[in-house]
Amino acid sequence: MGGRGLEGRRIRVRGQVQGVGFRPFVWQLAERMGIAGEVLNDPEGVLIFAQGAALDAFAAALAREAPGLARVEAVEAVPHLFAVAPDGFRIAASRGTGAETRIAPDAATCPACLAEIRADGRRRGYAFTNCTHCGPRFTIVTGLPYDRARTAMAAFPLCPACRADYENPADRRFHAQPVACPDCGPRLWLEEGGAEVPGEAVALAAARLKAGAVLAVKGLGGFHLACDARNGAAVARLRARKRRPRKPFALMGTPEMIRAHATPSEAEAARLMDPAAPILLLAAAGAALPGAVAPGQPLLGWMLPHTPLHHLLLDAFGGPLVMTSGNLSGEPQVTGNDAARDKLAGFADAFLMHDRAIVRRLDDGVERVLPSGPMILRRGRGRVPEVLPLPEGFAAAPVVLAAGGQMKGALCLTKGGAALLSHHLGDLDEPLTWGEYQAAEADYAQIFGVRVAARACDLHPGYRTTQHAEARAAAEGVPLIRVQHHHAHLAAALADAGWAREAGPVAGIVLDGLGYGTDGTLWGGEVLLGDYAAAARVAHLTPAPLIGGDAANREPWRNLLARLDAAGLAAEADRVLAGRPLALMRQAARAGVNAPPSSSAGRLFDAVAAALGQVAGAQSFEGEAGMAVEALAGETRAAPYPFDETPAGIDPAPMVAAMMADLAAGRPGAEVAAAFQAGLARAVCAPARRLVAAGQARAVALSGGCFQNARLLALCLAELDGLPVLVHHRVPPNDGGLALGQALVAAARLAPG
């Protein structure tokens, strides 16, 4: 050891810097630059004590050359006096407990590990191979700092060979917490009829898939149900067993397999290859798959294999697989082996199991690449728990826990200038999903060390999330901020775009299913003017009754009846809806009995879908009718149908009349669907454009579930050409992004600028 009192630096690195190979990266950087000292993990991130001649270059390289999975948010350096001069550079043990740092999301298998499972060696064919550049993270972690003892891998003591990898700073497995091999790690087996089948599990599974079987496959965040995507009978069998008649199935394939059935653009190919490995919606092209994969849809949801297990399975099977969530309809995805045996026995002919626990259930994410850029439709495995930096002006935002909505449940935490928007939790009307939501809330608060300063929720008094937030805020003695549904959508779009708090008001076009309005009615086709703190309703679709209440959300014909009658076309309704109980429905609408008025754009799409014969009875999944209208229009161009702008709102009556006349005259449905969407875009964009022209708004923001419709989004962007327009990229435009908006509104109201 050298002399005493040597000057150096104490360097703090904040962000997503644990579980991503950051410490070995620092060690290698220090070796290269002649830096002495040490690096360690602690609750705030990575801490470095450094001494040497190249400290400035060393500190700069920490962010510039960081590993691919790292997200460096800050590098803070202060002078440090070494009592004893360091001898070389070492990686020290982690210190403390708690959670100021970020946990990395699960990451798809890296090229090095993929090559290793296909080459000779002790990990050949091993389904749990990983390193610091890939593998499970959030699905296995139980606490911070991120070390093996605080993961599901604590149950698997390292063998001498894996420990040598784990302890070697020059190895890509240095402190990769899930590191394992067949001698010490999780094991894989095929189970049939409650008993393990002797033999090599992947080969046995592939043989059954080739024979048309349905398999339950345990993945990273839960079980999938898999079958041969090219076998129409197998796909139909899975649909029948799961009672899922029309909702599209997700697909898994290698890049070569995907290119046989789609022609991804360069941007789409890059998105597929992202470490998050999301389900990406791609236009079907090339060799056709059975129609039962995605009935009536021109888009297929593809993902690449994201674990060694999935790579090995595809290698052995030799073709694309349906890979859909393993769950009972409406329930959360199954994660445990016993639960799978219990709940999936009626679906699966066999089970591909392993014995590593899934600590945290994560659905696959769903994404799309549009001309306007990427759009996340569902945040899931691979994206969570990535944080979103809060816009300028929110650096001192308090810790807010926002409850989100009722459909597409998700919650949001703001902390330390960032927002953590949770993974997709599902429809909270389902009791088991509601239990999952409550567990997720406790989990996020515990693992990220949060003490909530305020809560935020929707205005709707009947939402479970609202009632829960009310109860928790009262119990904790913290403020509760109630946020109107469409204002939250607007704020989510602003936050997604990084719109500064003081950047001025915007015109928000918010089109979705339903949201509780400030006047006690149900909104859904809105033009707002506002910012984070407040928003006012400037224009909206003329309301129509939701005849039967929730039944109108399921049965599009009810919305067609309401819109035909409102347009003075009762006789036309009698003709096209013959056989329906119209007299009873009209009586309820006149009396206002279980027929609340709504300005919903989603229900207007439903009415059009019913008129076009796209959904004759009840929808089999949320959004089915709207997706059918988008798919029917395809690339067809048509002049917009007219809407009236009156003091009562943007009236669809002229559109309804023109549509029915065209259908009676035999106009092709694709043209009718295209003309409707063009007319809607023009109608809602006109008042927004006027707000910008008058200087009342600085930009236009587009949000709400209807903007998952790529055609409607493109039409609105064309109508707003020349104006600054904010669209969703990192946060779902649907209710999956609602909690982020609620959190930002609450922060703005709690700490006025």
Image (cartoon, rainbow, N blue to C red):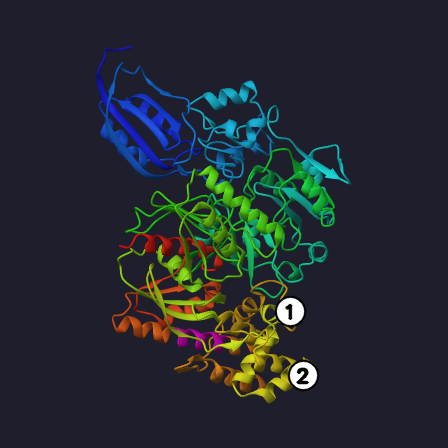
At 30% from the left and 72% from the top, the residue drawn is: 691
Q: Nearer the viewer, residue 210 or 476?
A: 476
The secondary element bearing badge 2 is classed as loop
Residue kind at label 1, given as amino acid type: Ala
Q: What secondary structure is the magenta-colored segment mainly?
A: helix
Image quarter of residue 234? bottom right
Residue 691 is left or right of residue 587, and the answer is: left
Q: Name the residue under label 1.
A: 618
Q: Distance between the residues labelled 1 and 2?
A: 16 Å
Residue 148 is left or right of residue 556, and the answer is: left
Residue 619 is left or right of residue 386, and the answer is: right
58, above or below 85, in the image = below
Residue 706 picture location, percent across and down = 48, 66
Outermost residue on the right side: it is 193
The secondary element bearing badge 1 is classed as loop
Q: Give the range drawn in magenta.
A: 674-684
Residue 607 picture location, percent across and down = 56, 75
Is residue 362 visible in the rendered image? The answer is: no
Is 31 magenta? The answer is: no
618, above or below 251, in the image = below
At 41% from the left and 44% from the top, the residue drawn is: 452
Is 681 magenta? The answer is: yes
445, above or below 630, in the image = above
Q: Mark 2 points at which residue?
A: 578
Residue kind at label 2, given as amino acid type: Ala
Q: How crowded is mark 1: few (under 14 residues within 10 Å), some or many (20 or more)?
A: some
Residue 560 picture location, percent across and down = 57, 78
Is residue 212 visible in the rendered image? The answer is: yes
Image quarter of residue 184? top right
Image mark for residue 207: none
